[in-house]
Amino acid sequence: MPHSTFMPAIQTEAQLQQLQLEGLRWTVRHAYDNSTFYRTRLDDAGIAPGDIRTLDDIRKLPFTTADDLRAGYPFPLLSVPFEKVVRIHSSTGTTGTRKILSYTQKDIDDWISFFARAYEMAGVTESDRVQIAVGYGLWTAGAGFQLACEKIGAMAIPIGPGNIEMQCQFLIDLQPTVVCCTASMALLLAEQVAQRGLGNKINIKKVIYGSERSSVSMRKKISDLLGGVELFDIPGLTELYGPGTGMECPQHDCIHFWADYYILEILDPDTLQPLPDGEWGEMVVTTLRKEATPLIRYRTRDITRIIPGACTCGSVLPRHSRIKGRSDDMFIIRGVNVYPSSIDEILSNVEGLGSEYQIHLSRESTGKDLFKIIAERGEHSSPDLDGKLRNETKTRLKHQLQVTPDIEIVGYGTLPRSERKSRRVFDSRIQDSVV
């Protein structure tokens, strides 16, 4: 690869493995010495920091899950004094309890640095203008995309999500060359550019998208509608700093991940045993430098695979495939993580609703994601109250999930019953392969 400002200095796999071993040993020691949670968890597993002598010893370590983050609310896994915490970010949780992650200044600096690396791998330079159409606030997306954009010296246009009129106006007036957004937002924007005949008035060269799965046909449609722009898939999750933890390179041969900042294992989600490179399994991550909330074998629930061999781009950093799915039932709608169990809990507290419901996810040709919940009224509820039930249900879901579904109330006994686990989620958005 050409000279890079943000790529690691390592040149060989052996150097990378040595760096990982040093980082793994530091993380286990740091967590053991500074986190009551981790000390207890490691003691229960009979593991002391000195037991980590090789990279293979990672398999001795216990797993960490989203349940551990919720149980430790509001400052789970905290491994530094509060005085060292300079920022928090938040993600949704399965039962309405948010997953709050803390950051030291070093954590922020590391995140910005490797996010800048992601931009650099996509060929973004100080000559680019970057329209950032992702969520700001508690979410990691907006802050990460903007700060890293400024780090490499590009012009940041922090417009945020939605607001198609402004998005299109800025594409014309400010002439951004890069757009950062979710895959569905990219499709919606591309459709609008085509419908409004803006193709010869804009200057988009690249679309960097993340937060949700995208299919091969969806990527092609976005590129075609925007005149052949180059697409880059960027991974990330709040627990692991945020977005920018890897990047699709210009060879578009899957995603390079920053193995100098975290170890990625691919495990069978049922047996939790390691799988050979090339086989699909659950992504499990262990941080190597994270101070405030280090992760030890954190089960992300994302399904992917390690791509064996070297990439033709020349980078020594390893690769994984685009995310294929989940090992749990979480889905992402309009950039928000939602668990059916969260919906179940909310609906169960709405007086007048029954116990049965369905979640329907679809996507219009414009790229707009549709989110609909069909819920039964209670056995003794009157149809005359359906309007009130619909409004109350929508209000509660919007407040607690930060995303608003359409609500349809149907009669008691309308939805199918099953002796087995009822199917709750019907997602028709992804119809073809993700790779």
Image (cartoon, rainbow, N blue to C red):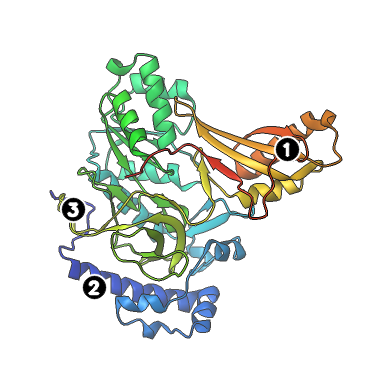
Circle 3 residue = 311
Would you say the residues marked 2 and 1 are in contact, meaning their CB atoms lie under 8 Å apart?
A: no
Q: Nearer the viewer, residue 366 or 383?
A: 383
Circle 2 residue = 18
Q: Secondary structure at mark 2?
A: helix
> What residue is at 20 percent from the left and 51 percent from the top?
5
Front label number (2 vs 1): 1
Circle 1 residue = 414
Q: Residues within 10 Å of mark 2 (few under 14, many from 20)?
A: some
> What residue is at 33 percent from the left and 57 percent from the top?
305
Q: CA distance from mark 2 to mark 1?
A: 60 Å
Q: CA distance from mark 3 to mark 1?
A: 53 Å
Question: Is residue 348 at all visible to an observer of this figure?
Answer: yes
> What residue is at 73 percent from the left and 38 percent from the top?
414
Amino acid at circle 1 = Thr
Side of 357 relative to 259 (left or right):
right
Q: Secondary structure at mark 3?
A: loop
Q: Position of residue 39 (x, y in %)?
A: 51, 79
Amino acid at circle 3 = Cys
Q: CA distance from mark 2 to mark 3?
A: 21 Å
Where 20 falls versus 421 (above or below)? Answer: below
Q: Position of residue 42 (x, y in %)?
A: 49, 80
Where 245 falls versus 193 (above or below)? Answer: below
Residue lying furthest front: 419
Q: Quadrant of residue 375?
A: top right
Q: Nearer the viewer, residue 164 or 89?
A: 164
Q: Position of residue 359 (x, y in %)?
A: 61, 41
Q: Secondary structure at mark 1?
A: loop
